[in-house]
Amino acid sequence: MKKKMLCLLLACGLPVLAGCDQNSGSEQATDEIVSATQDVFAMDTYMTVTAYGEAAEEAVSAAITEIERLNALLTATDNTGEVYAVNQNGGGTLSEDGMYLLERSLEFYGSTEGAFNVAIFPIMAAWGFIDDHFGVPTEEELNGALELIDIGNISVDEEASSVTLKKEGMAIDFGGIAKGYTSSNVIRILETYGIENAVVNLGGNVQVLGTKPDGSFWRVGIINPFNPDTGIGVVEVADCAVITSGGYERYFVQDGVNYHHIIDPSTGYPANNGLVSVTIVSSDGTLADALSTSLFVMGVDNAISFLEKNSELFDAILITEDGEISVTEGLAENFTCEQSFSIIKTP
Ligand code: ADP
Ligand code: MG
């Protein structure tokens, strides 16, 4: 599986170009700033939390505990939590985290006109992304799976904090949103320990708290989708999430064709709408994760009109299959890249 290999490389590499000389444990830097770093494998990827400040070690431990809690709770594939149980039983109660994610997912379904579909699980299964038995499904299999992703068949009872999946075989998949939610939660936890400078790297999805301890912006590398072991640019940020969806992250090849894990719910096929990488930069990690997946599905034209309508919520970096890079106005000054890029003007 490509993804794990890639993330190994990233664990101390590309996404955050500062602080990657950190190892597990805490240390007293020469300038007296205490820092701590810890790695964990969760949500099918390598994650690293680094914090600076007096309580760094305790804060990072609490962050890792939170990652492990959410990993167990939100997985659709391991029998450890509520999402798995809901999928097995056609419904059930959800925790505050589960309800929040479901409700936001349903909102994103509306705002992205169906590009973000939290019921995508049966399609993921049909392509073999759930059990790693990859293969192009037959038309019959795909049509059967498409019948199971109708969001209208998800009914939520807010008061009872429960969900019902009305059709047998339906299943929830938080894979497109859970990591962004996790990084947001981790940042909140670090803050409760008085941490003001931190970086959370969830397999290439990065969220930063404050600036680097020296006051300069964090430098987050954007992977080159045409050569994922290398970078294509760097974005300098403070206090926000930088989350990328790319077809290179998880895929299989059959008969010379590359099939990746971001599905266009209107066809049931891997999205093939001209974009090869979408990065969303936002203070809301959950939104950044959901929209990186969604804009990838929408394709360049629809993504740009979505950006124009929602520019107050986030910035973006889009890379097309022709290698063209577009960056929203709000990010242009903070993005550096060896090749030229165009600027998406937003109102
Ligand atoms: P990654 O998690 O690999 O960084 P994404 O955030 O784009 O990348 O999430 C991809 C995951 O999202 C898939 O593995 C699947 O679980 C889920 N997914 C795929 N297509 C969609 C879709 N159209 N809407 C919502 N979730 C999706
Ligand atoms: Mg996503």
Image: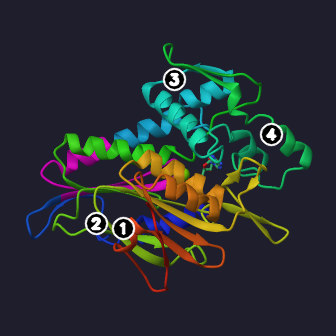
Tell whether circle 1 marks a residue whose Cβ is less than 8 angstroms from ligand 1: no
- Disc 2 crowd, CA 10 A, few/some/many (<14, 14-19, 20+): some
> Tag 3 or tag 2, which sits nearer the N-term?
2
Q: Is residue 231 above or below residue 172?
A: below
User: Is ligand 1 within 8 Å of the beta carbon of the residue shown at mark 2?
Assistant: no
* Viewer-side label of 2, 3: 3
Identified at 46% across, 52% down, the residue is 288
User: Dot 3 surroundings within 10 Å: few (below 14), some, or many (20 or more)?
Assistant: many
Amino acid identity at mark 4: Ala
Q: Is residue 254 left or right of residue 320?
A: right
User: Gap between marks 1 and 2, in whole Å?
Assistant: 11 Å
Q: CA distance from mark 2 to mark 3?
A: 37 Å
**Residues marked 2 and 3 touching at CB (< 8 Å):** no
| Lower sequence index among marks 3 and 4 | 3
The secondary element bearing badge 1 is classed as: loop
- Specify the label residue 22 is tagged with: 2
Give the CA separation, mark 3 to mark 4.
24 Å
Q: Secondary structure at mark 4?
A: helix
In 3D space, how far apart are the residues under numbered discs 1 and 4 (Cα atoms)? Answer: 38 Å
Kind of residue at disc 1: Val
Q: Is mark 4 within 8 Å of ligand 1?
A: no
Q: Is residue 39 left or right of residue 262?
A: left
Up/down of 210 relative to 139, above or below: below
**Which amino acid, by three-letter code, is at mark 2?**
Gln
Q: Amino acid at mark 3?
A: Leu
Q: Spatial distance from mark 4 to mark 2, Cα to Cα? A: 45 Å
